[in-house]
Image (cartoon, rainbow, N blue to C red):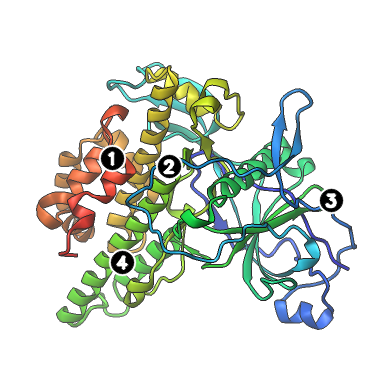
Amino acid sequence: MLVIPTTPPLPRHHSFLFPNRSTSPTPTTTGGDSSNSRRWGCSCSATATAPKSPLHHRLFKYSSRNNNIQMMRLRPPPLPRRVPGGCCRRRRLVFSCLVTDPDCFQVGRLIGTYGFMNITSYSGLRSEGMLGSAPLQLEDSGIFGSFKVQDVGEGNFQIRLYQGRISQGPFRGTPVVFKVYPGQQVGGIEADLMAANELNAHAFLQSNQNDACQNIQLLVGGFETKTGEQWLAFRNDGIYSAADYAKVSSQSMSKDPDHGDSRFWNPFDKDLTLRRRRYFVTKLFQGTMRGLAYMHDNDRLHQSLGPYSVVLNTMVEKEAAYLVPRLRDLAFAVDVRYPQLENDSGTLSEGLWRRASAAGAFTPMEKRAFGIADDIYEAGLLLAYLAFLPFCEAGTMDSLSLQRLLENTFQLDLEATREYCLADDRLLEGVRYLDLRDNAGWELLQAMLNRDFRKRPTAEAVLNHRFLSGSSL
């Protein structure tokens, strides 16, 4: 009466994810009766299918010869000796052994589905270290750090999210979120590659229990069904993303349609709300950069950073002191250890290295620097998103229109962008936020979005910038 899946999944390169609160696939439960199904809002109508051999301590490797995924024994790779100073060092529960037995999980209700965007063509920005005016046709996910987006298409499969919990073993009762990648018949080899890459990235980053970062989502296990679906289980530390927070915040800034006035009838209430929002947004971005700094210090690129790739444990601004942002969607993560850079032929990273070559990065050291700078550029776009959308009324701006404003309209000239935003009352609070500490926000944003990838700061330098380290917030 239960169907449970098992292979690892993967997000899409520079993917902006769009949740779709559909009610399509019906979740199934394991080891539960009809009463459990009603409690979790499930319908046990699926035919029982025994999963393949459990993942156990295995990783996945893509074989270019026979075009399939191969299982490998998990051997924790050595981590760099350097300790990332900006990353949180608080000890936390770490699953040293992934839970891979489907019978140990109970699947709950469907949370939603989301997909990813494919960028199918670009035109180059005319700047040092970037392509010229000749358009470059690519058939991979979007790269916004070096190109203007021309055509945006939806990915060819969707990922489902379910709530659940561990029902057996020492971690019994632990709430989890299942991320389900479709089998090859639906999602093709790409879905398997993404799942395998995401599993590998999390296993690598979690291999050192004494050096865990709380700003990265925790993988607790996974499994695969006979139908080829890949199910990854992550500890449920929140289901809302930074994009959800921005949407709720912008709605609170909207005017009351009945009275035509702002919802803040008391100016003191408005001032307090804005102060809380600034602190919440700053802490959200700090946590994001700590997670990114940890990944970079451990030779991993995120390559899919955006508002939907940051999960929050709370969206209540009064609870900002307890906010812990966590990076997720590591399906496009790239290994930038030097041996890998010399021999890398990964399908998912082809677009990155193609752009690196176009920018003049050919040696392993230059390619690594380009990849890190590419993540920083995406983090800069995220900072711009967080600086404006939560402080604007609903419908004023979205992520793509903001990106076009920065890249296409003003060609990454932030001084001109600021003058434009000052003239629009709807964007005024976002300008004021970036104006804090003598325009420190604009200064940081300009550095992160620098046209020359060699001049962008590291994640560690971003964390130490006066805009984020200042006590005035």
51 w.r.t. 313: above or below: above
Q: Nearer the viewer, mark 3 or mark 4?
A: 3
Q: In this orientation, does residue 244 appear?
A: yes
Residue receiving disc 4: 280
> Which mark is first along the chain, 1 or 4?
4
> Which mark is first along the chain, 2 or 4?
2
Q: Residue furthest left?
A: 438
Alpha-carbon distance for marks 1 and 2? 27 Å
Disc 3 secondary structure class: loop
Determine crowd level at label 3: few under 14, some 14-19, many 20+ residues with C-alpha closer than 10 A: few
Q: Is 37 placed left or right of 256 in the picture?
A: right
106 w.r.t. 359: above or below: below
Q: In this orientation, does residue 392 appear?
A: no
State the image coordinates of residue 182 (x, y, percent, origin top left).
73, 48
Residue receiving disc 1: 448
Residue receiving disc 2: 81
- Residue lying at 38% horizontally and 69% vertically, measured from the top left: 323
Determine crowd level at label 2: few under 14, some 14-19, many 20+ residues with C-alpha closer than 10 A: few
> Which mark is first along the chain, 4 or 3?
3
Q: Are marks 3 and 2 in contact (CB under 8 Å)?
A: no
Most foreground residue, 372 or 452? 372
Disc 1 secondary structure class: helix
Alpha-carbon distance for marks 1 and 3? 45 Å
